[in-house]
Amino acid sequence: MLHCFFPTMKRTIFGVFQRAHTYGGHSVVCRREGGRRSQFTTCLEQEEKQVQPESEKIKSSVLTDLFGRHHNYLRISVSERCNLRCQYCMPEEGVDLSPKDRILSGKEIVRISELFMKQGVNKIRLTGGEPLVRGDLKDIIKGINSFRSQYNLETIAITTNGVTLGKKLPQLKEAGLDLINISLDTLIPAKFEFITRRKGWERVMNSIDTAIDLGYSPVKVNCVVMRGVNEEEIVDFVKLTKDKNIDVRFIEYMPFDGNKWNFKKMVSYAEMIDTIKSTFPDLQRMSDHANDTSKAYKVPGHEGQIGFITSMSEHFCGSCNRLRVTADGNLKVCLFGNAEVSLRDELRRGAEEEEIWQFIEEAVKRKKKQHAGMFNLSKMKNRPMILIGG
């Protein structure tokens, strides 16, 4: 008698996983009574009885890497340009921008989104640079949103610095924007100008309030914590959640080209927790959703909540479900990896869908189990954050 089970596999079990993956939509392993190693076999006969459409076969494998991670979240940078110059994102001297004809057009962004949606991506986030500097952002969102029911798209989100969001948000919401992340690293206007090398703090705060008023719930606020810059404001950010339905996400300072990363400037998740508990000893850990990058917490009685993105001290590579496309059309399977392949070139040469899917699958299959440690990352060549997409 054969007992079949459909496990979520993260590694090869007696050489079965890769064979099972080759033969269709489910990783199927069968076990005879006794469970001895020599008795493990793939149920190819059973799979052949459950023949799947070719599109389903592609969907089951194209975005799944060799460690069993299925990628259903795509982050697309729509611009390399930004109206701020944040220290952790852009070198002080600026960056060399790609020529305009090498940046993805709005139609190409929508086309790439559709290709990934066909493979099971159900969350798309538009980033930059600053996405709001693109005059056609509303049309891009509207174009992606047009496929929502066809491909079971759940979420269209943006990450923005919020400087010009307030006046544009009503139109973006009408176009189909579901979620908003706003970057804000200080509650002090003068320090905002120091960190970003630009003015605009009041407009960012107004954008947060506008998003709340328009029903975005919660509004996520991203705060990169840097020692000697803003670590003394951590508790003030927590206090901001008392009467505002926001989710403040404290981000460990990460190394990228040109941001002069230094381990001594990084404030770890554990240290931030200790700082907060000195004022809010009843801080409560909340349950996280699958694939969450943020560890969620809440102060009892507060309307909003907080979270911690711990890329440096406690990586979450094992549950990573994210892929990135840069503004110039390169696919990055890991934020910290320097390997890239050009989807833009494939599109512009007129490649067929199946060719592009194979191209994507090969890149996904090369994704490593986890990124390097923080000290090695600081020595590796990678793009500045502004050229990757936040």
Image (cartoon, rainbow, N blue to C red):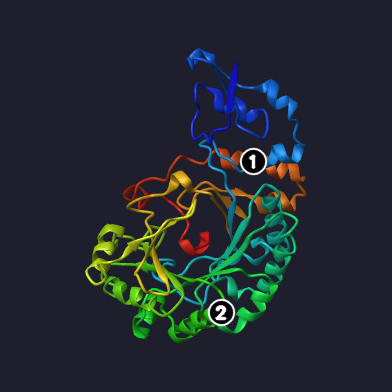
Residue sitting at 64 percent across and 29 percent down?
A: 22
**Residue shown at 41%/76% (left/top)?**
196
Relative to 132, is 192 on the left or the right? left
The quadrant of the image that shows the N terminus is top right
Task: List the residue tagged with mark 1.
Answer: 62
- Is residue 338 visible from the viewing direction of this image? yes
Mark 2 element type? helix
Residue on which disc 2 sits? 165
Q: Position of residue 100 (x, y in %)?
A: 65, 66
Q: In the image shown, does 28 or 108 lie closer to the viewer?
A: 28
Image mark for residue 364: none
Distance (Cα) linking label 1 and label 2: 35 Å
Residue 135 shows in this picture: no
Could you say where residue 253 lies in the image, as x and y percent from the top left?
35, 61
Q: Is residue 81 left or right of residue 191?
A: right
Q: 227 and 73: which one is in front?
A: 73
**Mark 2 Cα-neighbour bin, 10 Å: few <14, some 14–19, many ≥20:** many
The residue type indicated by label 1 comes to Val
Instruction: Report whether 160 appears left or right of 186.
Output: right
In the depicted structure, whether residue 130 falls above or below residue 314:
below
